[in-house]
Image: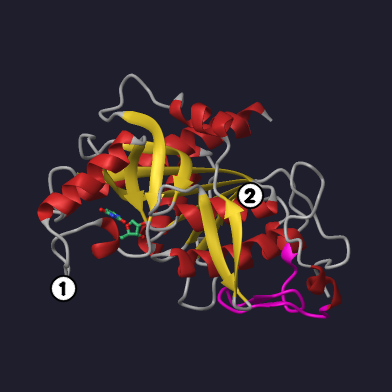
Amino acid sequence: MEASQEGMANNSSGSAMATNPHLLQMEEDVLYHFGLSTKKNNLQAMFGEVKFVCTGGSSARMEVFAKFMLEELHMHLPAGMALCNICSTDRYAMYKVGPVLVVSHGMGMPSISIMLHEVIKLLEYAQCKDLTFFRIGTCGGLGLKPGSVVVTETAVDYKFEPVFELQALGKIISTPTNLNKDLAQDLLSCSDQSDEFDIVVGNTMCTNDFYEGQGRLDGAFCDYTEQDKMNYLHELYNVGIRNIEMESLCFASMMNRAGIKAGVVCVTILDRLKGDQVVTPKEELRRWEERPQTVVARYIKGTFEKK
Ligand code: R2B
Ligand code: URA
C-alpha cells in the first residue's frame, strides 16, 4: 500500500479526519468515483502538500477556478504542460494547483456527500494536516441585490434547524451544521473597496430540491399558493436566512465530523423575494460566478503568502 492507512493523518487538532475504524482493516481502498486507489496511486506524493480544498458544483467552473488559482499563486507550468483533470472517471473533476485542490461536487447533497467521503479519505491517506475547505457556488438570495455574495454563518434545513439528518441502517444520525465563525469573518474582510458587489454574512437554507423544496411556483407541480410561498420566504428572511442552495448542510455536517475548518461562499443569481426564474444573461452569470472565487482566492493567497 503506497499511502498509509495505519498512521491515519490529522486535522488541526491532531485527530483523524476520517474516523471510520474499518478503514484500518482494508488492504486497499478504491476511491471509485475519482478513479484513484491507495494501492495503485502514491497518494501522499500526489496530494501530500494540499492545504486548501475548493469545491463547487460544475466541473467547467472548477477548471476555470483552477486556472485562476494558477495565476493568483504565480505558479507557472513548464512550457508544453497543461493543467489536467486528475479524476479518471466522469463523475467529478479534480485539479491540483500547489496547495490547492479544486474539485467539483455536482448538484445536491447525495452528490457532494460521495465526493466528500472520498476526498476526506484521500487527504487522510496523503497525510495532509491543517486543511481548510471551501464551497464556492451559486444560490438564490433573499432580499439581496442579485450578484451579491453570501458567506454562510450556519447552514440550516427546511425547518431552520442547524442539523443534517443522515439515514443509516434505518435510523437517523444527526450532526450539527455550524461553520467556523472566525473564518466567515475573515472571508468577509477579503472584500475590497473596488469590488462591484456586496458581501454579507448570513444563514443559508439548504434544500433537497430546486423547485418545490425552495418554494418555487415554476416547477412541474405546485400545491401551494403564491401567498404561502411569500409567507415562507419572509419567515426565512426574518430568522436571518439570506440565501438558499442545495449542498451546505451536508458539507457543514461532514466538515464538523472530520474536524476540518470550512467556509461556504455563494453568489446570489436572483432575489427569491422578487421571483423564481433565473433570467440573467449567461455572460453576466459567468462574471457573477467569479465573485466567490475571487473572495476565496484572496483568502488563500493571504494565508499562503504569510506561511
Ligand atoms: C446551487 O445551484 C444548483 C442548482 O441550480 C445547486 O447545486 C446549488 O446548490
Ligand atoms: N441555486 C439554488 O439552489 N437555488 C437558486 O435559486 C439558485 C441557485
> Image quadrant for the C terminus?
top right
In the rendered structure, which segment of residues is drawn in magenta?
26-44
Rendered image: mark on residue 220: 1
* Vertical comparison of 37 with 119: above or below: below
Image quadrant assignment for residue 201: top left
- Residue 75 in view in this figure: yes
How far is mark 1 from mark 2, CA to CA? 36 Å
Residue that appears at 44% across and 57% down: 247
- Residue 272 in view in this figure: no
Identify the element where label 1 is drawn. loop
Please state which amino acid type lies under the numbered disc 2: Asn
Q: Which residue is mark 2?
A: 256
How many circles with numbers are drawn on the protein?
A: 2
**Horizontally, is 150 left or right of 1 in the view?**
left
Residue that appears at 31% across and 47% down: 289
Residue that appears at 27% across and 30% down: 197
